[in-house]
Image (tube, rainbow, N blue to C red):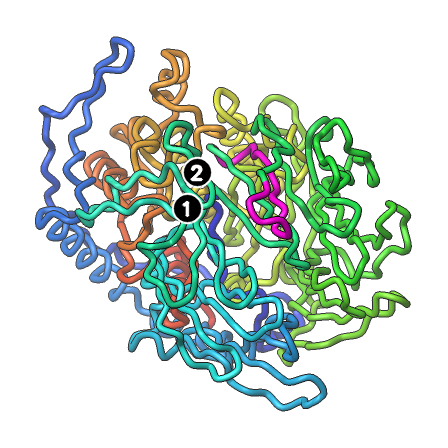
Amino acid sequence: MLRILTIATCIILFTACNDNASQSTLTSYKTIEVKYPETVKDSTVKDNYFGTVVPDPYRWLENDTSAETAAWVKAENEVTQNYLSQIPFRDAIKSRYEKLFNFEKYSAPFRQGKYMYYYKNSGLQNQSVLYREADGSNVAEEFLDPNTFSKDGTTSLAGISFSKDGSMAAYNISEGGSDWQKIVVMDAATKKQTGDTLELKFSGASWKGNDGFYYSNYERTKNGNVLSAKNDNQKLYFHKLGTPQSEDKMVYGDDAHPVRYMFAYVSEDEKWLIMGAANETYGSSLSVQDLTKPGSPVIQIVTDMKNNHSIIDVDDNYFYIQTDKDAPTNKLVAAPVANPVQANWKTIVEAKPEVLSVSAVGGSIFCSYLKDAVNKVYQYDRTGKQIREVQLPGLGTAGGFSGKMDEKETYFVFTSYVNPTTIYKMDLASGKTSVYKESKVQFKPADFESKQVFYTSKDGTKIPMLITYKKGLELNGKNPCLLYGYGGFGVSLTPYFSTSNIILMENGGLFAVPNIRGGGEYGEDWHNAGIKTKKQNVFDDFIAAAQYLVDSKYTSRDMLAIEGGSNGGLLVGACITQKPDLCKVAFPAVGVMDMLRYNQFTAGAGWSYDFGTAQDSKEMFEYLYHYSPLHNVKAAAYPATMITTADHDDRVVPAHSFKFAAAMQANQQGANPVLIRIETKAGHGAGKSTQQIIQEQADKWSFMFYNMGVKPAY
């Protein structure tokens, strides 16, 4: 999955503005002179695709370990930081955002053994700390503090797994945001490390007993160049405590029939090993193995990888499987444990027009439906009988409703663009909900409006969009607006509360999010309407959203910024190369910019379900070549653009952004700057330190406001 979140947290602190909505104050700023580094163009590097010769003059930037690339990165960062340092209100925005960010943040709790665990950040800690409370004690004990992992806070806790009785734990560490991680094992009772340390990618640990766990892994190349480390043939292993990783037994994998992704976990009762495999980001196989009978065969439930399937829960009678086979919006089926093949499935929750997501806790099944990008949640029993609708506090995003089979209560979080994230506790028997943790922020949701509109895309398709701003704002076309999009991999953009967006809204701005095709807001059909040779629909939907905002006087082209990350970075790159006058400011973040070679790097080959590849066919090559941001940069007046990437991004490798920035700088015909901001000790998005987040967001708003002529209120 490519999706990243540019927002650090869903809880915000807000200092109340005046009762009347403030309009942005406009001014005329001096032009900051920019002298771009000279980027060598190698005219000898070319590829032949079905008879079409394609130059690739910046391919040398793909070598992320060379001295030449390092020198280029250093020079580009110096140019960017010199530009940003001349923005007179940059420090004031950073100070304001730091104040907004400085409040206690909690996660929902989860039970392991005799403890309830939860994450807490006191305000400005670089990483959240994992705490626990013994049953009935109400006394918090620090369990694991990732702020001790590194001096600069750039090493993060990326996940943790406990044995069934909670006595052992294995936690993932990500250094600088890398997808390559370490697993460290500890005795949960004493909090002492056992000495077991493993390296892996795209996997956690799933315990069997207290003396070992399953995990998935790739073979890692030794030359240190992440671009050469293609992620294929992932295999399943078992690690026995006290032995080196090199001696771990391979449980499942086949060199003759390699799979790109392999995932597995042990059922709560430890009777079943549940396994899945995939070659792309859509479509998975499914199999199980009976762990109560040593040497039992692997039972293949689904083999064709043509649909998505996941086992939500298992009891003595059934596997409960969420699937979109013959149900593009998903359904829930029960597969008998005695013979769980597809022919024996029975549907217990039918598909509806709304997209279904299923979870389980305490013997109940929770069905969350997505209608026009907002949630409704229902509690069911295991026969598929509806017990009740969960009463949510409003229209927004609800998540959680999971836990162990013997739980009597569950927790969920609720958020929206105008509602701070609140954690709720729900009694499973009565359905009664109560606030468990409420943010102590001074924020009044009633002062803000989040309005859903439907606009028409190029081909007549109706697209929903949520627009959020302070009530009373005069919609006169003079308001700064940030339009955020993604549009890929079946990812649904649902409402979330943003600390960072307060900087925009308290300066008379609007935040707009369209649910464009390629996402999952209306199920797999909506996703498939934005893939391969239908990818242009995604760009057309986003361009139409910008046009709607201008035509409806929410903003103007001179006051519009567009942003997207990862697949959303591709979206922004494609839109500004197709329509350079679309907006005033553009933020393509960690984007997939080279659509002809993306599948040659690290995880890229797995994205072919959405994109297709230039090697598939002449038709597919020509389609990709037609919209690939890197290959469609031409001499034009582009928006003020700040490209962002990170040196440890081994998912969408930084070469995409390096090459795109070089091409944009060489072809910029207007006065707007084209900068690239390259974060060090950071990856694809997750795990950044608080200070990295604060500086990144301060730089974004400073760049946007300065180039729009907005004078912030501080």
Does the stretch in magenta take in 286? yes
- 472 versus 226 height, above or below: below
Foreground residue among 581 and 170: 170
* CA neighbours of label 1 inside 10 A, class few (<14), some (14 to 19), many (20+): some
Residue 406: give x, y in percent of width and height: 77, 67
Q: How many marks?
A: 2
Residue found farthest to the top: 51
Residue at mark 1: 250
**Residue located at (55% from left, 44% from top):** 295
Asked which quadrant contains residue 623, the reply is top left
- 598 versus 95 height, above or below: above
Residue type indicated by callout 1? Met
Residue type indicated by callout 2? Gly
* CA neighbours of label 2 inside 10 A, class few (<14), some (14 to 19), many (20+): some
Q: Secondary structure at mark 1?
A: strand
Residue at mark 2: 253
Residue 474 showing in the rendered view: no
Main SS, magenta residues? loop
Residue found farthest to the front: 294
Residue 598: give x, y in percent of width and height: 33, 33
Residue 64: give x, y in percent of width and height: 19, 47
Instruction: Say left or right for 652 vs 105.
Output: left
Q: Are marks 1 and 2 in contact (CB under 8 Å)?
A: yes
The span picked out in magenta is 280-296
Q: Secondary structure at mark 2?
A: loop
Say which quadrant the C terminus sits in.
bottom left
Label 1 to label 2, Cα distance in Å? 7 Å
